[in-house]
Amino acid sequence: MGNIRLGKLLGIPILVNPSWFILLGLTTWLLAFQVFPDSLENARTTTYVVMAVSSVLIFFLSIVLHELAHSVVARAYKIPVKNITLFIFGGVAQITREAKRPLAELLMAIAGPMMSLALAFAFLGAWWLLGADDTRAIDHVLFWLAITNGALAIFNLIPAFPMDGGRVFRSLIWLVTRDYFRATSIAAWTGRMFAWTMMAVGLLAFAGIDVYVARNAVGGLWLVLIGLFLENAARQSLVQGKVIKTLQGYSATDLMIADPPVVERTVTVGTLARGVIEINPRVCYFVEDDGKLAGIISAYQMALVPQAEWDSVTAGQAMIPSSKLSAIAPDRPASEVLMEMENGGLTHMPVVGEGRVLGVVGRDRIVGLLRQAGFLRSAGA
C-alpha cells in the first residue's frame, strides 16, 4: 500500500505512510487509558478519548511544522523539497539533495528542533495564560503538548546521524575539516554507536531492568526499534557517501552516449525496436517534431509496449516527453545526474551545451559504473 496524500502546505505535498497509523493508534490508546487518567482523575472515558485524539492530531501537526521548517530553509538555499511524509517514527522531509556548504546544512538541520522548541514554549505559554488549572482537561492537553514538543526538540538534537543533531554535528565537522566525505563518515559512525547504545539500553529495559529512559518492556522495545532504524539509516548514509565520492570523479560527458540518433515522432515502435533492442539494450533515440526536441525513447520505453502493438504505437506515444526531461550541462558530476534521475523517475537525461544536444546519459551507465566500483553485486541489484 502506497503513501496517502493529504494535501499541500506551502506548495509541499504532505503524505502519510500506512505505518503512521500504528503510531497514531498506539499513542492515542496510551494517552486515553494511561497517561490522562493518571493525571486527571475522575473524568469520563469519553473525555479521556477526546483529550487523547486532540493531543495526537495537534502533535502530528507539530511534526509537520517541524519538517516544514527544514523545508523552508532548504528552499531558501534553492534545494527542492519533494514532500513531507509522516511514518511510524515521526516525519521526514524529502529534500532532493545535500547542501553544498556546511553553514547551509547547519541552518537546515537546526530549523526543525528550533520549531519544536518554539511550539513547546507556545503551548506552555498558553497553559500558563489559561491559569495552569490541573482540574481542566485542556490544561492537561496543553501541558502534554508542551512537554512532548520539548522532548522532540531535545531528542532530535542528539548527535546521532542522520537525525537533526547528527546533521548539525556533521556540518560542524565539515566546517572545521572542509571535507564533506570525512565529516559524513565521522557523523555516520557516531550515529551507529548511538544506535547500538540505544538498542542495548532497550534490551535491558525489555528484560525488566530500570534504565530510567525506559521503565518497562514496551519502552524498551520502542528503543530497540528506533535504534535499529537509526543504525540502518546511518549505515546507508555511509554507503551513500562512498557512492557520491565515486561518482564525483565522473562528469556527464564521461558517461553520455554522444550524438544519439534522432527520429520523427510518427515512426512506429516496431521500426525502432525490431532487431535492435536484442542487440543493443541501451539504444536510445531523441524524438523530434518539426525539427524540435519532443522527447526521448529508449529500449526501456519500447519494452513497455506489448509486441503486438509495436506497429501501431508511435515513438511520440511511447516516449518520455521533453516537458518531463531535465537537461544537464556536460560538466555536471555524475552524482548530481543520478540524483536528478532518481527525483524525476527518469532513465535517461539529455546533455546540453550552448543550446545544443550533445548526448544522453542513461541510468544503466551509472549503475554499471557503481557495479564496477563494487557497490552493486549484480545487474539486478
Image (cartoon, rainbow, N blue to C red):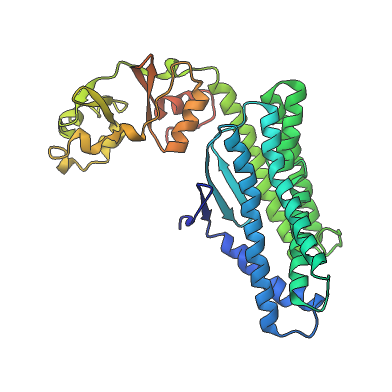
User: Image height check: is 162 above or below 41?
Assistant: above
- In screen coordinates, is 362 left or right of 52? left
| Residue positioned most to the front | 129
| Rendering coords of residue 121 (x, y %) | 78, 56
Identify which residue, 342 or 15, lies in the foreground. 15
| Rendering coords of residue 338 (x, y %) | 47, 29
* Quadrant location, the N terminus: bottom left
- In screen coordinates, is 30 left or right of 16? right
Residue at point 74%, 46% (across, down): 114
User: Image height check: is 354 above or below 234?
Assistant: above
| Residue positioned most to the left | 311
Identify which residue, 255 or 280, lies in the foreground. 255
Question: Can see residue 189?
Answer: no
Identify which residue, 88 or 275, lies in the foreground. 88
The quadrant in which residue 38 appears is bottom right
The quadrant in which residue 360 appears is top left
Counting the numbered discs, the total is: 0
| Rendering coords of residue 325 (x, y %) | 36, 31
User: Image height check: is 12 above or below 174?
Assistant: below
Identify which residue, 198 or 58, lies in the foreground. 58
User: Image height check: is 181 above or below 219?
Assistant: above
Question: Can see residue 245?
Answer: yes
Residue at point 52%, 53% (across, down): 14
| Rendering coords of residue 225 (x, y %) | 68, 55
- In screen coordinates, is 131 left or right of 101? right
